[in-house]
Amino acid sequence: MKILVADLEGVFVPEIWISVAKKTGIDELKLTTRDISDYDILMTKRLAILKENNLKIEDIKDVIASLEPFEGALDILNWIRKETQIILLSDTFEEFAKPLMKKLNYPTLFCHTLTIDKQNNITDYNLRIDNQKHRAVKALKKLNYHVIAFGDSYNDIKMIQEASQGFFFKPPDSVIAGFPKIPVTRDYFELKTMIKTLLDK
Amino acid sequence: MKILVADLEGVFVPEIWISVAKKTGIDELKLTTRDISDYDILMTKRLAILKENNLKIEDIKDVIASLEPFEGALDILNWIRKETQIILLSDTFEEFAKPLMKKLNYPTLFCHTLTIDKQNNITDYNLRIDNQKHRAVKALKKLNYHVIAFGDSYNDIKMIQEASQGFFFKPPDSVIAGFPKIPVTRDYFELKTMIKTLLDK
């Protein structure tokens, strides 16, 4: 039996931190795992920037509530869920993801949590587990699933490599250059074609 | 982080085989894991009965397409999916489940598959893996989830016992009697209250 796992940001919805950067005008918040591959360094930097600028959880939630999934994202996700099962594996946080999950018709999402203090400051982040994407694929394979994985960024590489079959969706050129053997899809039409092919095999 | 796992038949939708029995008038098909706790014995018997009565996969699919989720099932499932994550763990088959999943707004489902021959006879069943419910809970715990499990029947016991917290939903008296230490909920109101309590803890 087959199951899909996929990244969320950059695949179905915009990068949350980039959106926050645009709305707040803080350019440093535009950095993502596409730019800094070490997630802990990236997150520590993000939290420090939020503190410097006195940005609270509610400010970030306001931005996220104004985001929309990419055009066609809901359609392809609905199609996938009719055809097979999918679990979204994201290094985002439960507190951020909720308004976006509603707009995507509540697919199953495995992610992380934030620590919020009484003044609504984001004081820390809690990775549910290290390498969660990679580990989730291993766990699903152990449950005798043939796992098909796709994502766009550095933090998806181990997930894609561990999967029974894996490919990129809309990766930046730097990611393609670093992993030239991983197949690439560039829009939802190509994504659907790829998934159809892999499910039919 | 918390995640829910739950049985499907008897919890959100009617028992499929009982529905088939009623529609076809074949009383022997009414047996479920509530009556015969060994799933292999039960399934072998069911397939033999289908063959004797010349019932094809399309006949069973017709019955399933006429089933509706229990009153309130979609509401509570939608509520759960807004609050947290849920994965349905069912010993049903992909081929049977699809029309029901549509009516439940496509929650994630882990189940099994059937072997269908060219004459549309169901010739065999393929358990994706033995003890899949129990193993799924173990896998989710290994991914550092606090797993809350509920179901109604014998094939849910190991899942409930392995979970971080577990309880019954609408179990028959025989199941309650066999496992008196497992808490019991009897309708969706009690289910919602129980889930709220366990998520808030």
Image: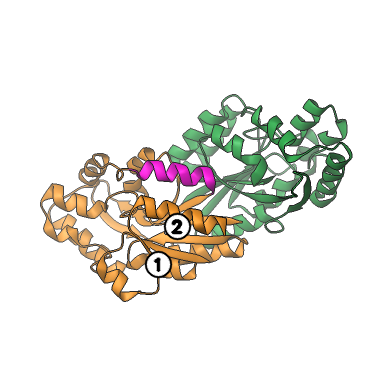
Chain colours: A orange, B green
Q: Position of residue B115 (x, y in %)?
A: 73, 51
- Asked where in the image residue B23 lies, by quadrant, the reply is top right
Residue A129 lies left or right of residue A146; in this view the side is left
- Asked where in the image residue A74 lies, by quadrant, the reply is top left
Q: Magenta segment, which residues? A: A72-84
**Does label 1 or label 2 sit earlier along the sequence?**
1
Mark-to-mark CA distance, 1 and 2:
10 Å
Residue situated furthest front in the rendering: B118
Disc 2 crowd rating (10 Å Cα; few below 14, some 14-19, many 20+) is some
Q: Position of residue A134 (x, y in %)?
A: 46, 66
Mark 2 sits on what residue? Answer: A194
Image disc number at residue A102: none
Q: Name the residue at 51% across, 35% down.
A: B105
Q: Are marks 1 and 2 on the same chain?
A: yes
Tell me whether circle 1 and circle 2 mark residues in contact (CB < 8 Å). Answer: yes
Q: Position of residue A69 (x, y in %)?
A: 31, 44
